[in-house]
Image (cartoon, rainbow, N blue to C red):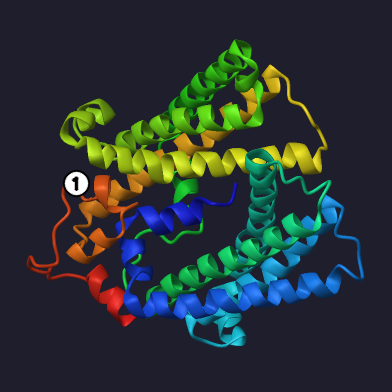
Amino acid sequence: MTMLHRLALRVLPSLTLAVTEREVRQRKRLVMLAPGLVAFAIYRGVKHLIPLTEPLTLLLLSGVVSAVTAVWAYRAGRGVSLSAVWKEDGARLVSWLVGWIGFAYGIQLSLMVLALLKVLVNYDFLRHPDGPAMMALIIACTSVARDAFEIGHVRRLQRQGESVLTFPDGSALRSLFREQPGQIVRWTVLAAVVCAALAVGVAHLAEAGRSALGQLVMVSLVTGCLAVMAYLSGEQRAGGWRGMLGSVGRTELFRFWWWPGLAFAATYYLVLVGVVLFVLRVETLHEIGQGLLAGMVASIMALYCYYLGYRRHLEDQAQQIIPTSLLRCPFVMGILSKGGVRSNKESMPTAGISVAESGRRG
C-alpha cells in the first residue's frame, strides 16, 4: 500500500504545518486544478483510440498519467526546474516519486474509486465503464498532484536547511523495522487475527454481513479502534495505550478513530476489493477470503499507526512547536494536541528553526 505518505503528511504535526500554510494551500489548489482538466481531456481523447472498458487498460493509463502528474506537481512544489530536481534530489528519490507516488498510488486510487462506486451505489465499471473510468482517472490524477506537490514543498524546505524529522518516503518506517521488530510483529499480527476473526464471524451471522458493504462497515469500525490503540502504543508514554486512554479525552479519541483510523481502513479495504473485483475478476468472496482482506487491512493500519505514534514521540522529544492555527485541521488536532505540545505563543527554542517559521517561508 502506498498511502503512508498521505498519513504522515496529515498526522505528523511538523509535516502538517509545512503544507497547510495559507500560501501553500493556495498554490496547491492551482496545481490540483490543472491535472484534473488534463486527465479529463486525455480520457476523452484516448477512449476513441484504445478500449478503456478493460480494467487493466484503464489502470495502466491511470498509472502512467499519474506518474507524469507526480513529476510535474513535485517540481512545482520544489520550485525548481526538472533538471535541478534530478541533479539535487537524485535518481533514487525521483524513481520513488514516479513509481510509488505516481504510478502505484494512481492505480490504487483508481481501484478505490471503482470499488467505491460498485459497493456503495452499485455503479459497476464492468457494465457501465464510461462514468467510473472517467472519475477514476480524474480523481487519481488530482490526488497524486496534491500529494506530490506537498512532498515537493517539504523537500524544498529540507533543501533550504529546515529541519525535517520525518521525510514521507518510508525510510523511517524501514528503520523502525530494524529498531523495533517485536512491536511491529505484535501489533500487525494482533490486528490481523482480531479483524479477520470478526470478519468471518460477521459473515456467518447474516447475508448482510457477507456483503461487501457489510464487511466494509465492520472492517472500518474495528480497524479504526485498533489504529487508535497502535498509535497510542507507538507514542511510548507511561502505561502504553491503556494509560493514554485515561489521559486523552473522548472527543480526541473519536477524532483519531474517525480520521485516519476509520477513513483509511475503509480506503484500504476498497482498494483490496477493487483488486478482487476488477483485476482478479472474482465476483464473490467466501468467508476465508473476506477474513484475509480484513486481516490485511487491519495489519497495515496497525503498522502505520504504530509508526506514526513513534514518529510523533520523536517529534515531542525534539520539542517542535505546534501553533494554535493548527486547530483549524479537525482531523489532526484532537488527539495530536495532547501531551507535550506547546503553542506558538510560548517562547521559541534557541536551537533550530520552528515548524511555524518553516511553513511561513514555504
The percent coordinates of residue 182 (x first, y second) are 43, 28
| Quadrant placement of the C terminus | bottom left
Among the 4 quarters of the image, the one containing residue 290: top right
User: Which element is circle 1 on?
Assistant: loop
Q: Would you say residue 163 is visible in this rendering?
A: yes
Q: Is residue 136 left or right of residue 11?
A: right
Can you give x and y, in whole percent of width and height, for residue 253 in the image? 28, 38
Image side of residue 146 versus residue 286, left or right: left
Circle 1 residues within 10 Å: few <14, some 14–19, many ≥20: few
Q: Which residue is label 1 attached to?
A: 338
- Which residue lies at the image location 42% right of the left edge and 54% below the top edge? 8
Residue found 62% across the figure and 41% down from its top: 120
Q: Is residue 113 above or below residue 157?
A: above
Name which quarter of the figure residue 95 lies in. Answer: bottom right
User: Is 237 on the left-hand or right-hand side of 72?
Assistant: left
Q: Amino acid at mark 1?
A: Lys
Q: Residue 309: image x %, image y %?
A: 34, 43
**Picture residue at 70% right of the left edge, 55% below the top:** 107
Q: Residue at x 19, y 32 (%)?
A: 238
Number of callouts? 1
Up-down relation of residue 27 to residue 259 (above or below): below
Observer-nearest of 45 and 339: 45
> Looking at the image, which is closer to me, 17 or 127?
127
Would residue 161 be visible to someone looking at this image? no
Q: Position of residue 244 (x, y in %)?
A: 22, 32
Horizontal side of 165 relative to 57 (left or right) equals: left
